[in-house]
Structures are given as C-alpha cells and as structure tokens.
C-alpha cells in the first residue's frame, strides 16, 4: 500500500505536521508576549502608588486657625497718602509773599497762554503792597498799607464800586473779617459780597444806592457781580487777599480747588490789568 501511494503521502504528512507545528508555535509566541506587557503595567502601577504615598506622607496637614487666634494677629495698616493737612501739621506756616502769587498765576495760565502772554501777565514789584508777616490783625494791616484812609474815604463818590476789596474763602470768614476791621473802617460803609442767604439782585441794588467804601467777599460772588455789571473797578485802589488764613484742614483759600478756580477767573476780569496800569495794588494779608 505504501508503494501504491508512493512518496507523496509522506510529503503531505510531513507538510501537514510542519504547518501544524507552525500554527502551534504562533499562539505560544502570542501568549508569551501578553504576560510581559501585563507585568510592565503592574510594575508601573505599583511605582505610581508608591510615589503618591510618599508625596502624601511629605505633605504636612495645616491646622485651621481659630477665631481667637485670627483676632489676636496684628492687622497690617495701609500706608495713607500725605494730604495738605498732614504736611502742614508738621511744619510751621510761612507768611505769603508776592512771589507766591506770581507762581500761582504762572502755573494756572501755563497751559492756556503762550510764553509771550505769560510774560505780559507778570506783575512788577511796584504792583504789590507790603505783606502780612503773621503779626498783624486786619485793622493794623489796613492801617499800614493805607495810612491816609480818612482822606481817601471822603474822596469816594462812585456808586457800584469800592475802594478796598478784600477777598476771602467763605461767608463765615467774611463776617469774621468785617468784625476785625472795626478799629480801621471809621465811618466807611462796608458791604458783604457772598452768596449765602443773599441774592445777587439784592447786592446789585445795595451797591447802586450810594457810595460803598469796602467790599468783603468770596471770589465766586465778586466775579458774578462784575459779570452782571453790579460791581465795577472804577474806584478800586486796594485788593487785599486773605492769603495766610487756613481752615480746619489747614488749607488756604488757594488750596481749595473750586475757590482757587473762581479766584483766578476774578483776576482775569480786570484786576491784573488794573495792576499793570498802576491803578490797583495787591496786598497779601
């Protein structure tokens, strides 16, 4: 029978055996690969767990502070910006001088006028009266700058005008200054020029009635009266600025923004021009 089949049957069997062994080898190889991969993944997982555990052990748990402990801690204080009041409270006040007013005018008009126009606004020393050295009362200061007052007040015949114009910061300060000049004014007529409780129409009528010698008021109301032709500068000879007086916050009249603005506008309304024409002189009280 073996001879009848010839050599082919043996070749077929050997081929089938070879293919079978190859097929058996392939799964074996596959099964060998899988455990290696699993082994690697498990090793990585173990290492990751160990690392996480070590990190957790390193972290020190923070204890929450009690309310008493928080209140016991000193609070940090914020640094406050220095104000005008803070600066002046630690320094002695210095009396104002003509250079202070010159600097103020230059600073205010620097972005509004050309260099040539700024030069024209500069006042000569002859435009200024002597300044208060902080030793004078208002009466003694007025006597110093205007020694011939009795004669000058008799020469006043203009209506809607004053000989002396005193400019200050508030209605309360106006009343205070009028009380202080009792020893100086004599028979001169004094008018209050502020907005509080007094209508501008009433002040215009009062100025038109007869001659007025001294006007004491705030920059805002004085400027409004000039604009409404209730007050003119025909008889004006002296402008006294309440320069050195300070309020509760130690601010001067020119340190308060709204009053400073009204004051500078008032100077523009003819006072600076009258000074340059030598008709008016300025004093810093």
Image (tube, rainbow, N blue to C red):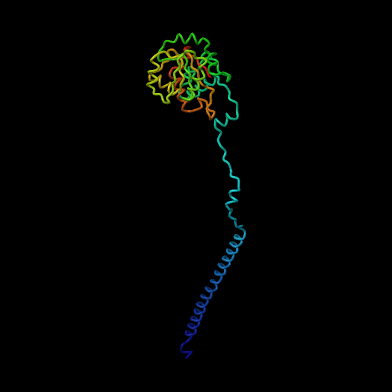
User: Compared with residue 79, is residue 118 higher up or lower down, i.e. above or below?
Assistant: above
Query: Which residue is found at the position 58% from the left and 25% from the top?
Result: 93
Q: How many marks?
A: 0
Q: Quadrant of residue 97?
A: top right
In depth, the one of 25 and 268 nearer the eye is 268
Q: Quadrant of residue 209?
A: top left
In depth, the one of 25 and 80 nearer the eye is 80
User: Compared with residue 22, is residue 245 higher up or lower down, i.e. above or below?
Assistant: above
Residue 105 x %, y %? 49, 21
User: Compared with residue 248, is residue 131 higher up or lower down, i.e. above or below?
Assistant: above
In depth, the one of 184 and 281 nearer the eye is 184
Query: Which residue is found at the position 44% from the left and 17% from the top?
Result: 270
In depth, the one of 265 and 225 nearer the eye is 225
Residue 172 x %, y %? 48, 25
Query: Which residue is found at the position 56% from the left and 68% from the top?
Result: 42
Residue 156 x %, y %? 44, 10
Residue 130 x %, y %? 55, 15
């Amino acid at each position: 029978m073996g001879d009848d089949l010839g050599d082919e049957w043996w070749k077929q069997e050997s081929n089938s055996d070879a293919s079978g062994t190859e097929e058996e080898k392939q799964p074996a190889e596959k099964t060998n690969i899988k455990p290696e991969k699993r082994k690697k993944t498990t090793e990585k997982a173990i290492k990751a767990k160990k690392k996480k555990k070590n990190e957790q052990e390193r972290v020190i748990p923070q204890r929450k502070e009690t309310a008493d402990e928080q209140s016991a801690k000193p609070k940090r204080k914020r640094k406050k910006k220095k104000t005008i009041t803070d600066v002046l409270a630690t320094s002695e006040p210095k009396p104002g001088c003509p250079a202070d007013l010159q600097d103020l005018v230059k600073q205010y008009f620097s972005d509004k006028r050309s260099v040539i126009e700024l030069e024209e606004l500069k006042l000569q020393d002859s435009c200024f009266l002597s300044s208060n050295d902080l030793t004078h009362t208002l009466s003694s200061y007025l006597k110093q700058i205007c020694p011939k007052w009795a004669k000058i007040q008799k020469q006043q015949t203009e209506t809607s005008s004053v000989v002396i114009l005193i400019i200050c910061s508030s209605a309360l300060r106006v009343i205070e200054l009028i009380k202080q000049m009792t020893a100086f004014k004599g028979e001169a007529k004094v008018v209050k020029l502020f907005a509080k409780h007094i209508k501008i129409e009433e002040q215009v009528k009062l100025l038109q009635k007869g001659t007025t010698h001294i006007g004491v008021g705030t920059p805002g109301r004085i400027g409004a009266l000039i604009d409404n032709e209730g007050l003119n500068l025909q008889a004006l000879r002296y402008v006294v600025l309440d320069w050195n007086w300070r309020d509760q916050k130690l601010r001067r009249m020119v340190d308060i923004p709204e009053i400073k603005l009204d004051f500078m506008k008032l100077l523009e309304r003819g006072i600076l021009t009258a000074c340059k024409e030598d008709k008016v002189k300025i004093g810093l009280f």
